[in-house]
Image: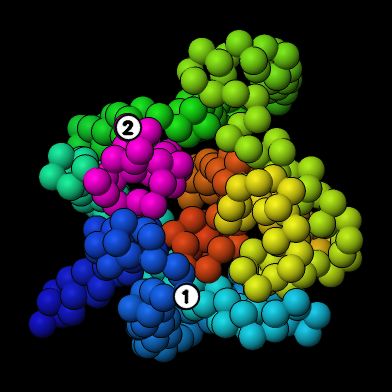
Amino acid sequence: MRKFLVSAEQILTFTCLMLYSGTPLDPFLTDGFTVKEGDRTIFRLLYTLTYIVSLSLIALRWKKANYVFSKDKFIWALIGVCALSSFWSSDPDITVRRVIALLGTSIFGLYLASRYTLKEQLKLCAYMLGISAVMCLLFAILVPQYGIDSYASLRGIYPTKNVLGKTFVLSGAIFLFLAMTTKENRLLSWLGYLTSGVLVLLSKSTTSIGNLIIITVAFFVYDRVLHLKYKVMIPILTFLSIIGIAFYAWFISEADTILGSVGKDTTLTGRSELWPVVLQMIAKKPWLGYGYGAFWIEQNSESSIVVQAVQWDAPNSHNGFLDLWLALGLPGMLVFVIGFVINWLRSMYLIRWNGKSENLWLLVYLTFTILSNLTETSLLEQNNLEWVLYVSAILSSKLSTRPNVLK
């Protein structure tokens, strides 16, 4: 009976992860993602169900969940700022509803960290993303009107090629981590990594291709270099940083040639036109912002100014950090940045003084968070797998931190 209950809980967790990532039902229920968010009642009901399930399962292990909850104050402080923003939000009703959804999403992340070890969490994610990969390929073959966009780029079960690309950059990071840190099913993990890479290539998302390369290189740097002695580690990190900055400077100076060779232009699909206008809107309310989730809605006159200025229907800033500042102003930015930097430095320290893989994954995932939010928005987003894993990665890394002293 116990095995049955454990299996049932794992299946339930797997289903919730699939819902947060994107299900094969999404394209059908939204007629190829043409139905507006406000009309997607069934998805709101499904997400609400995941909140109820998470709370119910946490209640069964409330002591451990309470202990895990207390391990990081900044996540909950940030959600608190989101809640407070309803008092000055340009649309308080929207803000309140989305804060509740964000809290529910964060509670699911808390549940993952309190119920499963980090590797168990990532294995469940790997199974889910493996099935998603198969579904993306099947959609491209069987229902190409949904699986392939008008530019012949793969989008599979996701609304755009960029979402698919970003999702399988994350998938590649997970499979690479499992392949390098777990002996069990190592061959399968490498196959998952390679498949993720193929899907990213088929998406034709230049940003995602670059991000997957950076994440792969970063993994090996973190895993190898951070264990070296300081007199060796610091020069190597300095050298790699100089190389990285030089490469970035070269890329910017040669952007016309590089992007032109892959059919892109230096406007980065309108982002370089969008960001200056967004910064102007931030400058109007830099201290408190427009309220969580309240800026990018149709009835908001401020967002309509942005859309009119750039002459395309921007759904967000295409930059998670700009959207965070738009929503929560300086207080929200400070709470996030302080918490992020503390966890970044802490993970680097513990990789050196503690052999546990939780800290390596946290550092890799924080790197992914930065990369994925430079040209897209998923930071502090409700009903989103990336925020679920952000919460679980930070909390999981803090459950066992006793260092093994290295020579």
Kind of element beneath mark 2: loop
Q: Which of 313 and 104 is in front in this view?
A: 313
Is residue 354 depicted above or below 290 in this figure?
Answer: above
Give the residue drawn at x 78%, y 85%.
Answer: 87
Q: Where is residue 361 in the image (x, y as percent from the top left)?
A: 49, 45
Q: Nearer the viewer, residue 344 or 207?
A: 207
Side (left or right) of 193 relative to 103: left
Q: Is residue 193 magenta?
A: no
Give the residue drawn at x 35%, y 38%.
Answer: 150
What mark, if any, has residue 73 been given in the picture?
Answer: none
Is residue 261 in view? yes
Side (left or right) of 255 relative to 386: right
Q: Where is residue 15 in the image (x, y as percent from the top left)?
A: 27, 68
As shown in the figure, which amino acid type bears the numbered disc 1? Gly
Q: Where is residue 396 in the image (x, y as percent from the top left)?
A: 50, 60
The quarter holding residue 367 reads top right
Is residue 11 depicted above or below 212 in this figure?
Answer: below
Is residue 257 depicted above or below 379 in this figure?
Answer: above
Kind of element beneath mark 1: helix
Q: Does the magenta stretch include residue 158?
A: yes
Side (left or right) of 204 relative to 206: left
- Residue that mark 1 sits on: 38
Give the residue drawn at x 56%, y 63%.
Answer: 381
Is residue 406 in view? no
- Residue that mark 2 sits on: 152
Q: Give the range drawn in magenta.
A: 145-169
Give the residue drawn at x 60%, y 41%.
Answer: 375
Q: Nearer the viewer, residue 208 or 390?
A: 208
Q: Where is residue 388 in the image (x, y as percent from the top left)?
A: 48, 63
